[in-house]
Amino acid sequence: MTNAVTAGRLAGTSPSTSDRARPAWLRPAALGVALLALAALAATWSGGGPRLLLGLLGVAAVAHGVTVLRAARTGAADRTAAVAGAGAAWLGAVAIALALLSATATGWVFVVAAVLALPALAALSAVRRSLAAPGAAALAVLAVVVAVVFGVDGLLTAGRVLAVVVVALAGVAYLVSAVLTAREAAAPAPAAGCGGCACSAGGGGCGAAALR
C-alpha cells in the first residue's frame, strides 16, 4: 500500500518537474536568439538598426524596472532593488526617447554608455571599486583620441559597433547558459540507496552495517 502511494506521488510530481525544467532553458535560449538577431540587424541596417537596438533595449529596461517596482510593492523586493528598478525604468524611457529622436543621438548614447560601462561595473563591485576613477579617465581619453583621429562621425560609429558587439556577446552567453541548463535537466538522477558504495561489499549494504 505504501509503495503504491509513493509511486503515485512520484508519478504525480514528474510532470511538474518537467514543466519547471523546460522554461529554465527555453527562456535564456529565446533571449540569446533574440539578442543575436537584434545585433545582426543593427550591424547590417546602418540607417535604423542602431536606433531599433537602442529602442528595444530601452523597452526591456522599462519592463524590468516596472516588474521590480511591482515586486517591491508586494514586499517581494527590498528598497535597494526598488531604487535600481526605478533607475532602470527611467533610463529605459530616456533611451527610447533618444532612439526616436535621431541616429546621431543614438550614437552618442552608445558612446556615453561605452565610456561609463567599465567604471559603473567597477563601482558596483565591492572588490574593484578602485578601478572606477582610473577606468573613467582612461575611457574618456580614448574617446577623445578617437574623435580627434577619426572625427566625431568615427567616434559615433565606434560606439555603435561596440554596442553591437556587446549585445552579440550577451546573446552568445545566454545560449551557452541555455545549453548548460538543458544538459543539467537531461542528466539522470543519482541512484537511491548505496549506489555501489564500499560499505555494500561483503556485508549486506548500508542497512546491514547500520544494524550491526
Image (cartoon, grey):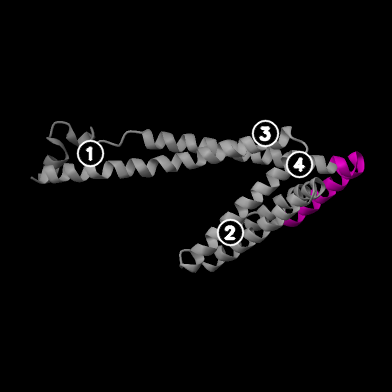
Q: Nearer the viewer, residue 70 or 142?
A: 70
Of the two numbered discs 4 and 2 on the same chain, state the one appearing first in sequence.
2
Residue 119 image point, x, y percent: 71, 54
Give the distance between the C-alpha atoms of the residues marked 4 and 2, in whole angstroms: 24 Å
The circle on residue 160 is 4
Residue 180 image point, x, y percent: 46, 36
Residue 169 image point, x, y percent: 63, 38
Q: Residue at x 66, y 55 (%)?
A: 92
Please, is residue 75 above or below residue 153 in the view? below
Give the distance between the C-alpha atoms of the residues marked 4 and 1, in whole angstroms: 55 Å
The residue that mark 2 highlights is: 65
Residue 36: image quadrant is top right
Q: Secondary structure at mark 4?
A: helix
Q: Is residue 180 left or right of residue 199?
A: right
Residues in magenta, as a range: 131-154
Q: Residue at x 12, y 34 (%)?
A: 203
The answer to whether residue 101 is magenta is no
The circle on residue 192 is 1
Q: Residue at x 57, y 36 (%)?
A: 33
Give the distance between the C-alpha atoms of the residues marked 2 and 3, in whole angstroms: 26 Å
Whether label 4 touches label 1, CB < 8 Å: no
